[in-house]
């Protein structure tokens, strides 16, 4: 038998949000996106458990790092025919880097994808 959540919440004398937590039901989370530098098209997407400001701070530091030709590259493209990207650096500014196939940065439960001039990585 299906019971309407609002009816059940009302019968138990709790609000719907409390009932959702008690039942382990969470509303669908909306993926956050932040434009970090509009003129360059640099953005942080799929932001989870961190602020847009914190994600953009890391994204812009990464962009500045890549612009300095003296710095070691973060990734390289593999040889033909697959051209599969390979990470050369697995952490940046305390954040773990992964290709999922997006360029994902994570620290604990916080994570976001980097988008912009060089991301997502295109090795073709």
Image (spheres, helix red, strand yellow):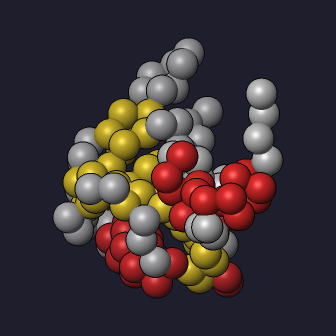
List x then y, in percent, for residue 42. Answer: 59, 72
Q: Is residue 13 left or right of residue 6?
A: left
List x then y, in percent, for residue 28. Answer: 67, 53
Rendered image quadrant of residue 62: bottom left
With respect to residue 28, does 32 lie above or below?
Answer: below
Q: Quadrant of the C terminus?
A: top right
Number of numbered discs visible in the structure rendering = 0
Residue at image position (59%, 41%) is 122
With respect to residue 41, does 81 lie above or below?
Answer: above
Check the image and name the residue furthest to the top.
81
List x then y, in percent, for residue 3. Answer: 76, 41
Of the pair 114 and 81, the residue shown nearer to us = 114
Q: Quadrant of the N terminus?
A: top right
Residue at image position (76%, 58%) is 6
Rendered image quadrant of residue 109: bottom left
Residue at image position (51%, 46%) is 24
Q: Is residue 15 left or right of residue 53?
A: right
Check the image and name the residue furthest to the front.
11
List x then y, in percent, for residue 33. Answer: 63, 68
With respect to residue 11, does 97 lie above or below?
Answer: above
Residue at image position (33%, 71%) is 65
Specify whether residue 118 is in view: no
Rendered image quadrant of residue 49: bottom left
Of the pair 16 and 37, the residue shown nearer to us = 16
Specify whether residue 26 is in view: yes
With respect to residue 21, does 59 lie above or below?
Answer: below
């Amino acid at each position: 038998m299906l019971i309407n959540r609002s009816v059940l919440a009302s019968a138990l004398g709790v609000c719907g949000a409390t009932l959702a937590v008690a039942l382990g039901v969470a509303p669908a989370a909306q993926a956050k996106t932040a434009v970090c530098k509009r003129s360059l098209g640099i953005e942080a997407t799929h932001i989870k458990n961190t602020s847009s400001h914190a994600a953009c701070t890391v994204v812009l530091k990464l962009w500045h790092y890549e612009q300095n030709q003296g710095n070691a590259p973060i990734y390289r493209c593999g040889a033909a025919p697959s051209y599969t990207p390979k990470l050369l650096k697995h952490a940046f500014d305390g954040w773990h880097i992964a290709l999922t196939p997006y360029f994902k940065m994570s620290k604990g439960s916080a994570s976001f994808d980097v988008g912009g001039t060089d991301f997502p990585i295109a090795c073709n």
